[in-house]
Every structure is written in C-alpha cells, then in structure tokens.
Amino acid sequence: MTAFDNDAVLPLTGLDLLTTTRAVRKRLDTTRPVSRDALRECVRIALQAPAGSNNVSIRYLIVDDPELIAKLGALYQAGFDVYRGLDGIYIGSIHKDDPAEAAQQARTAASAEDLAEKMPHMPAIVIGCVEGVTRPENMPGWVTASMHASAMPALWSFMLAARLHGLGTCWTSVHLQQEQAAAELLGIPYDTVSQLMLTPVAHYTGDTFQPVTRPDPDTLIHWNRWGH
Ligand SMILES: Cc1cc2nc3c(=O)[nH]c(=O)nc-3n(C[C@H](O)[C@H](O)[C@H](O)COP(=O)(O)O)c2cc1C
C-alpha cells in the first residue's frame, strides 16, 4: 500500500506520460468541474519532487471560486494583451524559416489566443508560488535560481499528476506582469511570497495526446566543454 490512490489514475507508462503531457488549451473543457480531491491528490504526488535544502518552499494557490477566476482571468488577458504587442517575443511573431515549424508556431499562437479568451471561465486555476521573495535586485543569482528551482520540479510534477488524473494544464507566465494585482485579489503576501507561474486545470476533451517534434538532442548537448 502506498499513500497514493493508484486506482484513480490513467494507466500510462512513464514514457507515455513524459512524451504526451502537452500544453493543453483548446481541449480544456470549461463546462466540467474539477474535484478538490483530485487537485489535492495531484499536489500530494507533486510534493515528492526535489527541493533545495529539503525545504518545501512551494505553495499552491488553487482558485476554484468562479468570481475570483473571472477576475484572475481578466488579469491574465491584460498580460496577454501586452505580450501580444511584443514583437519577436509573442509566440505568433517568432520567425521560423522552416514552413512546418512556422505552421506549428501559428497553431500555438492560435491556441494561446484561445486560452486567453477562455481563462476567465476555467473550473480551476493554480498559481505556483514560492515562500520567499525572489525579486530583490541584490540577491545573488544562484540563490534566486535555487529558490525558483525548488518549486519548478514540483510544479511540473503537479502537471504530470494532473495528466494522470485526466486533467489538462498549461504552464503560463503572462499574468506575472500583474503579479501585484493578482496578489491583492487573492490575498497573497506580496512581500514574502513570489508567484512563479499560473496554470488552468480542467478535464480535456478527446482521449489522448501525441509526442511532438523537438530538436535533435545532438544540436543541444555540449559534451564536457561548451561547443563540443
Ligand atoms: C516559462 C513558460 C512560460 C509560458 N507562458 C505561456 C503563456 O503565458 N501562455 C501560454 O498560452 N502558454 C505559455 N507557455 C506554454 C508554451 O507555449 C508551451 O509549453 C510550448 O508551446 C510547448 O507546448 P507543447 O508541449 O504542447 O508542445 C509557457 C511555457 C513555459 C515553459
């Protein structure tokens, strides 16, 4: 017996889980509620992730109140509007020479637009936070990086656990432009807690997802020394 409810999860292999957990946007079902039990179980699983100094500094702010989600969704949309105006950074403005990659980029942009539109209607939104302030300019880079890195694995694990529970997620960052406003809306102590990301959580339509094309590993690996 483990502390985890194995009966409640999809029978995916580890390879399936790692290669088919996608950024789900268009297929998020906004009409179906997400149970708190499932969300709690995903957090329980995610907390097996590593943390610096074995200090669990991650916090999950789970919003399932429709009024708050509507307001948070509007903050997300405001951030997305700014992002859309940033030529060269906005996903739809990144130039790809390869026609297949350009088409993929256009699909991702359309999907991101769709998510922005639907965000105020999600059944649940999770904001990944870290206890501690990662913003001070005089903080050494390695400390900030370690604080972030203590939370990121557990956030990705949360998304993998969600997939096992038949729930779709999408890592997003544009609401962080409105971090302070989100903190005020949700009572997050802005001076002691940093928000790192936001993900919608919803059941998805359809059955499964597919691996996508990614760069050849040999174009990204440096063996022993940079450039080799
Ligand atoms: C740091 C980070 C920030 C992201 N921000 C956003 C965002 O603000 N909005 C959004 O729709 N997707 C966002 N994404 C999702 C990426 O677009 C997505 O992971 C990428 O397109 C790969 O998708 P795939 O795994 O389904 O192929 C973000 C992903 C990461 C890792």
Image (cartoon, rainbow, N blue to C red):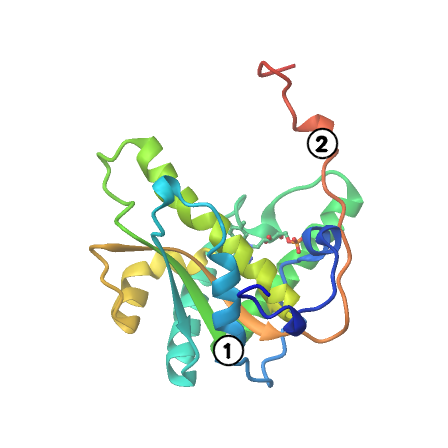
Which amino acid lies under the numbered mark 2 shown in the image of this protein? Answer: Pro
Depth order, front residue of 201/44? 44
Q: Residue at x 54, y 73 (%)?
A: 117
Position of 25 with respect to 211 (left or right) is left
* Rendered view: 48 above or below 78: above
Residue 126: quadrant of the picture: bottom left
Crowd around label 2: few <14 · some 14–19 · many ≥20 (10 Å): few
Q: Quadrant of ligand 1?
A: bottom right
Q: Which residue is mark 1?
A: 37
Residue 224, given in percent of the width and then of the height, sits at 60, 15
Question: Could you say whether the residue bearing mark 1 is in a helix, strand or loop?
Answer: helix
Q: Nearer the N terminus, badge 2 or badge 1? A: 1
- How far is mark 2 from mark 1, CA to CA? 38 Å
Position of 111 with respect to 158 (left or right) is right
Placement of the N terminus among the 4 image quadrants: bottom right
Residue 196, given in percent of the width and then of the height, sits at 40, 53
The mark found on residue 217 in the picture is: 2
Q: Residue at x 39, y 45 (%)?
A: 148
* Rendered view: 1 above or below 86: below
